[in-house]
Image: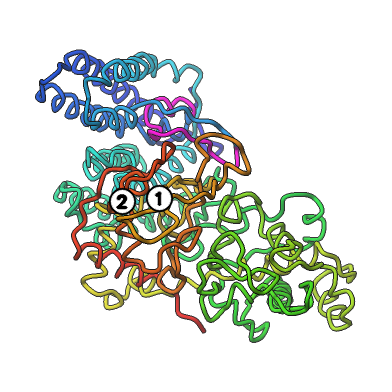
Amino acid sequence: MSLTNATGPSIGVEPMVQYFRSGAKDFAASTLTLQSTINLLRKDDTTSVATARTQLKACRLQYKKIEFFLEYFFKTSSLIYNTPAKAEIEEPYMEYNEPVGMQVMEALLYEEDVIANKAALLEQVNVIRSSAEDLLSLLYGFTADDKQVLESVRIELIRVYTLGITGFDAPLLKSGITESYEALNAVKVVLAPYLDKRAPYADSVIYYLDKSLWFLEAGKDFDAFDRLRFLRQYALPLQRTLGYMIRDMQLVLNTTGGVLNYSAEHLFSKDAINIDAFPAAGNEKFKSVETFPLSGIAATPALYKFNSPDAFSSTTATVNGALISLGKKLFHETALSGNNKISCATCHRPEKHFTDGLATSVAFDGHSHVRRNAPSLFYAGFQYGQFWEGRIKSLEEQALDVVHNPFEMNGDAAKVLQLPAYTVLFKQVFPDSTVTAEKVAVAIAAFVRSLNPRNSSFDQYITGDTTALSAAQVRGFNLFMGKAQCGTCHFAPLFNGLVPPLYNLTELEVLGTPKNEDLARPLADTDKGRYDVLNISFYEQAFKTPTVRNVSATGPYMHNGAFTTLENVVEFYNKGGGSGIGLETPAQTLSAAPLQLTKQEVADVTGFMRALEDKLP
C-alpha cells in the first residue's frame, strides 16, 4: 500500500483505508441481516415486508459510508451494489448495465405483490452479500496518494448535492437526506487528517462541514427538507472552501477528463462544467480545421450578442469572438438552404429562446411539418448526443445534417463559397481561408456553444441575491429536487440529462409520452425514438432528457410538442407518465407510481421552472 506522495509522506491515505476496512465490515454485516429479513418474507405478513424495507434502508446507510471510496477507486465493483433499477446502456461508452443491487431490491419491495418477488429479492441480496464479504480483498496491492483521496471526497460532495438530496438512489424509501448525512459524515472522517494539519481554509471547511451535517441531521423529513437553503448557506460554501484548501495544499488532481472544473467556485458557477470536454466533432474531418482552442466560450457571459471583440479578455477569446461572430452570421444565412429562404434561425429564433413556438417545425416545402419539436439551443453544447434521439454526437455534425436534410434546409453548406463576403470572414478565423462545409459547421457549432447566459432569477439567487426568487419559487425548487423527483432526471446545475457527479454521459428516458394532451383520453405516439438508431428493445420510445432551463419560454413541450402548458407536463409526470395514464409502455424508465403532488405543489414546481428563464439581450 502506497503511503507516500511526490512531495513526501501521505497525510490521509492510511486513515482512509482504515476507515474503509471498518465500514466494509459493517456493510457486509448489514447485507447478511438483509438476507435474513428477505428469507422471512411471508404471504399476508405486512410486518415482514416493513421489516425488509427498514433493513434495506439500514443497508443503504452502511453503503453510503463507503460509497466515496468504492465509486472513486473501484467503480466497476461498486456497480454490484447501487445501479439503477432499470436496464441501461450508458453512452457514449456503450456499457450495458444489467439491473442489480439495492435499487432493484427497493423497486421489488414496493410492488403490489412483494411475496411474488421473493425469489428475485433473494437472488439480488445473495449477489450483494457475497460481494460485500469480499470487499476487503480490493485492498490487496492497493495504492493511493493524497491527491486521489481529496478528489474522491470532492466528487462525493457533488454526488450528495445532485443525487443524494434528490433521492435518486432510493425514491421509494425516501431515505436520501439520511443517506446524504452518512455520506457527508464519511467525508468529515476522511478529511480529518488534513484539517488537523491546520491547512489554509481548514477552519472554514470545518465550519461549513459541521453546519451541513447539522442541517441534514435536523431535516430528516425527505419531502420537507429545505434543499435550497442547504445548498446556498452550507453545502456550496463547503465545496468552495474545500477547493481553496486543496489548491493551497498543492494537492489538486483532476481525473474527469476536464469535464469538472476544479477552479470554479462551486457546482452552480458558470464555469463548473467545462464545455470544451464535450464532443467537438465526430471525426477527423472536423478536428482538422479546428486550429484554435475553444476555451472561454462557455464561461463568458452573453457572448451571443457579439457586439465587439472587446467582450473578450484574451487573444484566444478574440479569435473565438471572430469565430462565433462568423457562426452567428452563418446561423442566419438563408443561402445555406436549397431555396435561399430558410436559415437555422428559422426554426431556432433568438427572440424565442432559439425555438419557433410550434409543436413541430415547418418543413422545407413550406406546408408540411418535420417529425419532431425544435428544442431550444441554449446549453445545447453540454451534451454527448444531439437531436431528440441522440443520433449524432457533435454540434458540427448536427449543423451539417440539418443543412443537408431534404426535409429541413435541403441545402449545401459549401454554397457560401459563392458569396465573396465570406472569403474575408473565413480568412479572419482559419489559416486556410478556403470555405468548406466542415468550416461552416465548426463556425455554427461555436456560435451554438456560446449560448450559455446563466442569468436567470435562479442563477442570481444561488449566487447571492436572496430577493431574486419568490417564496413559491423556493418551495418549487425544493419540490423539483425532492418530492416531485424532477431533479432525478433533470440534473443540477444544467437541469438536463447530464448524469452527475462526473457528467460523462447523457441520459435517455422512456416516458410514454402520448400523442395528444388529453391525459384522460391519451393516444399512443408511434415515434420509436432511439430504437430507430439502435434496435434495442428498451430503447423503444427513448428520448434524450432536455434542459428545463428556459422551458417557460420554449413551449410546446416534449419531443412531439404534445403539451402546450407546463402545468400539463408536470401533471403528466404526477400521474406516472404513459403507464400511469393507461398507455402500454413496457420499457418505461419513469416510475408509474403517482407523485401525489397537490395543485399548489404543481403550481410551485412550474413557478420554479419559470425562474430558470434567461434574460435575453
Please state which amino acid type lies under the numbered disc 1: Cys
Report how many numbered discs are placed on residues in the image.
2
At which x and y percent is residue 191? 34, 41
Residue found 45% across the figure and 45% down from its top = 510
**The image quarter in which residue 493 lies:** bottom left
421 displayed left or right of 184: right
439 displayed left or right of 458: right
Please state which amino acid type lies under the numbered disc 2: Gln
CA separation in Å, label 1 and label 2: 8 Å
Against 387, residue 108 (above or below) is: above
Instruction: Let me know if residue 251 appears in the view.
Output: no
Against 28, residue 393 (above or below) is: below
> Considering depth in this image, is 210 or 396 the residue closer to the camera?
396
344 displayed left or right of 66: right
Report the residue marked by disc 1: 489
At which x and y percent is residue 354? 55, 73
At which x and y percent is residue 411? 79, 68
At which x and y percent is residue 580? 31, 46
Magenta stretch, residue numbers: 76-93
> Considering depth in this image, is 605 or 261 the residue closer to the camera?
605
Residue occupying the far bottom of the picture: 307
Identify the mark at residue 107; answer none if there is no mark. Answer: none
Residue found 53% across the figure and 34% down from its top = 537
595 displayed left or right of 289: left
Does the residue at mark 1 contact the one at mark 2 (Cβ under 8 Å)?
Answer: yes
Residue found 49% across the figure and 30% down from its top = 97
Instruction: Let me know if residue 226 appears in the view.
Output: yes
Report the residue marked by disc 2: 485
Q: Pointer 1: residues within 10 angstroms few (<14), some, or many (20+)?
A: many
> Considering depth in this image, is 332 or 592 the residue closer to the camera?
592
